Amino acid sequence: MNQNLRDKFISQWQKYFPNAELPITFQYSDDTMEIEKEKIFGGHRCVIAQLLKVRKGESVCMQEESVNCRGGKRYLGFSRNLFPGIECFLSHNEAGEGERYKRTSELAAECVKGLPFIPVKENIIFKRWDKLTEEDAPAAVIFFANPDVISGLFTLTCFNSAAPDAVITPFGAGCASIIYYPYQEELNGTRRAVLGQFDPSARKCVKADVLTFSIPYSKFVEMIDEMEESFLITDSWSIIMERMKKKN
């Protein structure tokens, strides 16, 4: 990717979103890009938890065996199907056991049956924005952010769009909202941003005031070029900026 673009965003981000966390990115690759493969963990571990180190600046390479969450394998593209019994997991079984995210197992099955499979390469590479190099080709940009930051990202996403759904909030796992859906938006050319991290199972892995906002990369490039002609230069945003400056 263009290093000038990388640095331009960092400069503008620090100016208009003071103290806000830099975003991370993901891309699929035929090789590991010389990044050590993520170690295999015993038991269940949410992909969102595995990304904490990326948010802190460490690049990560995941392969199918790096992901031991059954839903995570599907939403990262390493499995063609969701696991057997997903409908009872999302709702509940005859014994009343389940997450109860859907009222009935039939409703849950209807919800997930139409999700298209997206073929991917062997490796998915996660990097924080400031760690990107010329060889990188991100598919999407992911922000872990509080409401003030998300307000700015939402409004900037809608800046050059007349569509009422320039930002979508599809039902799904935490990893679906930051990987599966934004990647699908990039491939389809619809390029809508995805507001996410509403999944209670994944919310345990983020702070109480954090949601995610994921943007297909081609859309994000346009947004960078529009930052300094948008609402970000107005008095209204300057008030929110001052509030951000006071946040530790």
Image (cartoon, grey):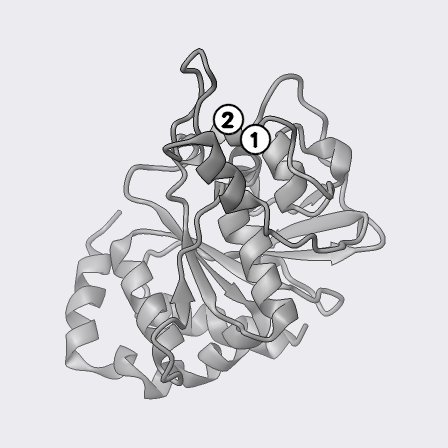
> Are the two marked residues, 1 and 2, in contact with CB atoms closer than 8 angstroms?
yes
Residue 205's x, y, as percent?
A: 43, 33
Residue 247's x, y, as percent?
A: 23, 51
Residue 101, located in which quarter of the rendered image? Answer: top left
Say which mark, if any, is on residue 174.
none
Relative depth, front residue between 15 and 110: 110
* Extreme residue in the front direction: 106
In three-dimensional space, the C-alpha distance between marks 1 and 2, rounded to whole angstroms, equals 5 Å
The residue at 52%/52% (across/down) is 178
User: Dot 1: within a 10 Å radius of its alpha carbon, few (fewer than 14), some, or many (20 or more) residues?
Assistant: some
Residue 131's x, y, as percent?
A: 62, 57
Q: Which residue is mark 1?
A: 86
Q: Is residue 163 left or right of residue 216?
A: left
In this rendering, does residue 227 appear at all? yes
Residue 5, located in which quarter of the rendered image? Answer: bottom right
Say which mark, if any, is on residue 89.
2
Relative depth, front residue between 71 and 226: 71
Q: Amino acid at mark 1?
A: Ile
Relative depth, front residue between 98 and 31: 98
Q: Check disc 1 and report its element: helix, strand or loop.
A: helix
Q: Which quadrant, please, contains the N terminus?
A: bottom right
Q: Is residue 234 left or right of residue 177?
A: left
The residue at 72%/29% (across/down) is 39
Q: Is residue 184 left or right of residue 157?
A: right
Rendered view: 81 above or below 178? above
Rendered view: 102 above or below 94? below
Q: Check disc 2 and report its element: helix, strand or loop.
A: helix
Q: Amino acid at mark 2?
A: Phe
Rendered view: 197 above or below 136? above
The residue at 32%/84% (across/down) is 230
The residue at 70%/67% (across/down) is 137
Residue 177's x, y, as percent?
A: 49, 51
